[in-house]
Image (tube, rainbow, N blue to C red):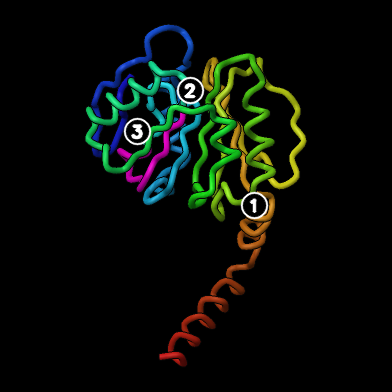
Amino acid sequence: MRVIAGKAKGRKLRMVPGEGTRPITDRAKEALFSIMGNWIEETRVLDLFGGAGGVGIECLSRGAAWVDFVDLNRKAVETIHANVRHCGFESQVRVERLDSFAYLQRYHGPPYDLIYVAPPQYQGMWLKVLTLVDSQPGLLAKFGSVIVQIHPREESPVTLQRLEEYDRRRYGSVRLIFYAAAEDLAEDDAEEALPASDQNEMEFDADTDDELSG
């Protein structure tokens, strides 16, 4: 496993000893960050069930401002610390050895732009995380995303009040499902639906207001 792009491009990352974690494949990770593009810059990220820290470290390498890593596995936490040091991002992270569900329930800090969820397989944990994030609006920033990494066979219906699925991709044994607040998605759709003339008029009005206020 390696860092694909950015400040730490090419750095090899340690794997967590044993079989309790499932690192994302390079193919799926490359596709994921291609989808996100420059959006990841200056974001706050939560890497739940952090494993070796590959996704969070890739975010930092590509310009994320801060990453919180959470994992209950002692070996995983030690591996994250080692990989973060190796890539030179110690000042931009916090690593918590804690149950991910407890972390979500207790968290009262700034909201996250990205919450990445890659729990152990076939235990339904991703559904519980989604439900928790859905019930706590303060966890996710405006226009933030929750991205779930599961095996395709783990897919199951989920009833959500605030979050809504807006994309899904499959890369071999990796399924990525993207969620955001339904109101944010509706706002995006409304802006995209505006005719070009209306958008130009809105921009003109904003410029006029700036001139008057100056």
Dividing the picture into quadrants, the one containing residue 7 is top left
Which amino acid type is marked by label 1? Leu
- Badge number at residue 72: 2
Q: Give the Cα distance between marks 3 and 1.
A: 27 Å
Q: Which residues are magenta?
A: 59-70
Q: Give the Cα distance between marks 1 and 2.
A: 33 Å
Badge 2, how many Cα within 10 Å: few under 14, some, many 20+? some
Q: Give the Cα distance between marks 3 and 2.
A: 18 Å
What residue lies at 57% left-to-right and 78% top-to-bottom?
201
Q: Position of residue 41 (x, y in %)?
A: 37, 49
What residue lies at 48% left-to-right and 11% top-to-bottom?
20
Please tell me whether mark 3 sits on a helix, a strand or a loop.
Answer: helix
Q: Which residue is mark 3?
A: 57
Which amino acid type is marked by label 3? Ile
- Decide: marks 3, 2 in contact (CB < 8 A)? no
- Decide: marks 3, 1 in contact (CB < 8 A)? no
Please tell me whether mark 1 sits on a helix, a strand or a loop.
Answer: helix
Q: Nearer the viewer, mark 3 or mark 2?
A: 2
Q: Position of residue 35 (x, y in %)?
A: 47, 39
In reply to whether residue 193 is colored magenta, the answer given is no
Badge 1, how many Cα within 10 Å: few under 14, some, many 20+? some
Q: Position of residue 152 (x, y in %)?
A: 63, 18
Q: Which residue is mark 1?
A: 185
Query: Up-down: is 64 above or below 200?
Result: above
Q: Position of residue 183 (x, y in %)?
A: 68, 55
Please give left or right for residue 17 compared with residue 131 in the image: left
For the N terminus, the image quarter is top left
Front-most of residues 24 and 65: 65
Question: Which one is earlier in the sequence, the residue at label 1 or at label 2?
Answer: 2
